[in-house]
Amino acid sequence: MKKMSMPQKEKPKKMIDSILLIYHHYSEDNAPTIMEYVNAFSQHSRFPVVTVNTEFGFPPILEGYHFKSIVLHYSLFGYWPYQLNKHFYDYLSANEDSFKVAIFQDEYRFCQPRFRFINDYKIDCIYTCLAAKYIPAFYGKYTRAAQVHSVLTGYVSREILQAAENLTTPDEERTIDISYRGRPLPYYLGKGAQEKVEIGKGFLERSAGLNLNLDIKTGEQDRIYGKEWYKYLANSRGVLGVESGVSFSDIEDRARLAVESYLISNPNTSFNEVYENVLKPFEEIIPIRTISPRHFEAAALRVCQILFEGEYAGVMQPMVHYIPLKKDFSNFNEAIRLFSDPAVRRRITENAYRDLIASGRYSYQTLVEKTDLILEENGLTRGENQALLADIRRKLADIRRKFAKHENKRRFFSTLRHSVASSRFVQRHIKPILYPALVKAGFFRPKS
């Protein structure tokens, strides 16, 4: 893999005792968990926080300043290439003395570019969704990061607590018995990733004749975002779910390329065929399975969860916090019997609310307090920067207002770009051929 070209380093002019949090968020509605995670730092940190959305481009005001701590949010790293333009890469390189924290999710793909990014831009601390036992063979082997901490994909936010207070209704007043929204994921992500569709389809196939009002859909077009998601969930007595993540990590980026190549020659093949012919040797190589924000949302809104069996990061236990459903659906009738008992639903939802929500153990405040301690141990203090920070925030707000004037046009092209880039057709057929050609022709600077 070609080494990242490193820009010329220029030292920023002023040192600021503050956290610079860099993230990416499209202008259209997206999963609320992204901004809940971002906003949690400003809400709970003991230190001042400046947030920058790379969707608006690089703000020139940053050029003059060196932030003692830089936190890179997982929303930057969901796709490759990252949501960082050349100016942001230059800035990270120039600020090599800042203590840098990178928060990663979806770590099972594009691994080698991520490892190179960590090393080239001197990331000091990594937040990972990996179980601690897998860290040495993953980040320990491939990167020089001094610290690696296992965290969850999301936590309990102020927003979900407020939604729970406003939207929670008695079980008997809800109109949906069991709800679910999932979506198909690329074949190269393996068996675990296919569970998001399998649980919905398998449940519907076996539900004919049941006296239940089901709202279960597994299409990209059926996804629900923002506040509407909370309203939908709060109107449900039960919800299906699976562990977040995948059943293997494509550490050498070989599985993805092999699957894409196979699909070019066999475009209409099923996942099972791809699994048998390509993916089988990769299964269970450093799996990444964990709990997701969806489980906390359901717990907060007192929705009874029917979940595929799994570990759920040790946070949720079967028949304590959820009704377990075997992945072959062999206990389907038993799961339905348990769910149909209002007393069972009440006990499970109260347990989940008590342990996941009311305990405060899994709140964003807890995560940010942990981060504050790490940053403090590595030089961050509460300096006298208030006037300077106010000026920076004011100029960043001016940039956001300018973009807001062109919101409709920007929303259209942003949505189009995101839809095209993430479509299965582009991922399978266009990107493997077109992107390398454009890199070779000089249209993109390869970042790995």
Image (cartoon, grey):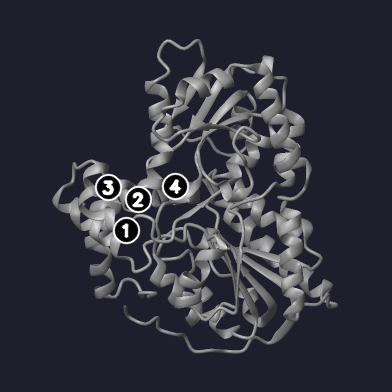
Residue 321 left/right relative to 222: right
Q: Are marks 3 and 1 in contact (CB under 8 Å)?
A: no
Q: Secondary structure at mark 1?
A: helix
Q: Are marks 3 and 2 in contact (CB under 8 Å)?
A: no
Mark 4 Cα within 10 Å, few/some/many (few <14, many 20+)?
Answer: some
Name the mark nearer the viewer: 3 or 2: 2
- To which residue does mark 4 refer? 415
Name the mark nearer the viewer: 4 or 1: 1
Label 4 to label 1, Cα distance in Å?
Answer: 34 Å
Name the mark nearer the viewer: 3 or 1: 1
- Residue 58 screen position, x and y as percent: 55, 70
Q: Secondary structure at mark 2?
A: loop
Residue 190 is tagged as: 2
Instruction: Judge whether 255 appears above or below 331 on screen.
Output: below
* Residue lying furthest right: 384
Amino acid, disc 3: Phe
First of labels 4, 3 by sequence position: 4
Mark 1 Cα within 10 Å, few/some/many (few <14, many 20+)?
Answer: some
- To which residue does mark 1 refer? 282
Q: Secondary structure at mark 3?
A: helix
First of labels 3, 2 by sequence position: 2
Amino acid, disc 4: Thr
Q: Nearer the viewer, residue 304 or 389?
A: 304
- To which residue does mark 3 refer? 425
